[in-house]
Image: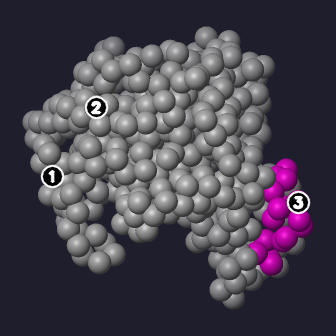
Amino acid sequence: MPALTYTLLREDGDPGSRARLGRVETPHGGFDTPAFMPVGTAASVKGLLPEAVGSIGAQIILSNTYHLLLRPGEELVQRMGGLQKWMRWDGPVLTDSGGYQVFSFADKNSIGDDGVKFRSHLDGREIHLSPERSIAVQNALGADIIMAFDDCPPAPDRPEVVEATALGPRHAVPDAEYQARLAQANDRTARWLARCVKAHQRPADQALFGIVQGGIDLDARRQSVEQVCQHDLPGFAIGGVAVGEGFDQLKRVTEHTAPLLPEDRPRYLMGVGYERDLVTAVRAGVDMFDCVLPTRNARNANAFTPFGQIRLRNARFSEDERVLDAGCDCPACAGGFSRSYLRHLFIAGEMLGGILLSLHNLRHFQRLMLDIRAAIRDNTWSAVGRHWPVTLAEGPGTVRSDGRDLLESDADV
């Protein structure tokens, strides 16, 4: 059996959509697509038992190569039997390459064609991460899906200029410095992918995904697709759209890039995010997503709802007897925990607040994916907008188009 199989079950009947319903199988089980992966950075979805993560509908989780390389080290994880056995998660796991974290610490690294040298944020020791080293670490960790080591260029310093023409909006070409960086990143990503393929020691039980770069330049994206897809890989990812470009560019880049990727392989949009982003990317033909937002926001007392985020530290919730979302079946809502009580937990510094909100937020995104999969199956996209008004919002999920706070609307959330 191959390390990964993807079965395309249905294509969306809406003529304006490229959404797909599918199923991915791995050595540790399968998952339905479109899929949202909770992030367990250091082999743990913070504060939650593995069975709790599974109980809210998650079928696959993500762990981070960079953090596990630094602590406890991949050799220890390998001696303990690999990620799944060690962390007591019996489903599929994806590990990223560590490249995004290294590049995001620009003040701590030096980048060259051979890889990246950086200093650990834990103890300051110098570490060299190359394509070969990234793959060796991921081989040792034992995830079902591993990611190629790529060069992720930053977003341009200024938003891309959009000019009106007789034919509609025209996206101006970013400046020469940005174009040169994109060309360098594309070529380096292609060379590094070839090295990753050669270094991969477990192709029979670990599926290596290639990553497409190219920033916000559509020609550069097409070039990167051509370079990356020269390799016959089990799946492909779109990188570099969660580094500050904004929704309009995410939409434009994803709608251009996703259809260029092989139809018979899963497509993964890395590091995305908000509900509107997910719906937009699914309709562009993307199958897999991950983001730290649900759990990170939960630890900061921010709860997601179909109408927008509830910021529980706000004093107006101190005597609010309602649950976070009356339509949610998570332990917080189904258990009857009021907004008043949840707010108290955060004000008092009780860890139960972050646990309950993490479960709620993760369930929120799993429920959204369930409704998205139903919309593809039954061609009922209008129901997604009705049940999830936040997917129609103009911002990252807090304000609706007329400028009113969604939570101050007449909707009973």
The residue where tag 2 is placed is: 198
Residue at the (66%, 45%) spot, across then down: 91
Residue type marked 3: Ala
Q: Count neighbours of disc 1 (C-alpha within 10 A) and say few if under 14, some if 14 to 19, many if 20 or more.
A: some
Mark 3 lies on residue: 334
**What's the magenta region?**
327-342
The N terminus, quarter of image: top right
Q: Residue 96: x and y, percent?
A: 42, 47
Picture residue at 70% right of the left edge, 70% below the top:
355
Which quadrant does the C terminus fall into? bottom right
Percent from the top left, x then y, of residue 48? 68, 65
CA separation, marks 1 and 3?
Answer: 49 Å
Mark 1 = which residue? 111
Going by the numbered disc 1, the residue's amino acid type is Ile
The answer to whether the residue labelled 3 contacts the one labelled 2, judged by CB atoms less than 8 Å apart, is no
Identified by mark 2, the residue type is Lys
> Is residue 335 magenta-colored?
yes
Q: Nearer the viewer, mark 3 or mark 2?
A: 2
**In the drawing, does residue 119 fall left or right of residue 319?**
left
Q: Foreground residue, 284 or 231?
A: 231
In primary-sequence order, the first of circles 1 and 2 is 1
Residue drawn at the location 35% of the way across and 36% of the way down = 200
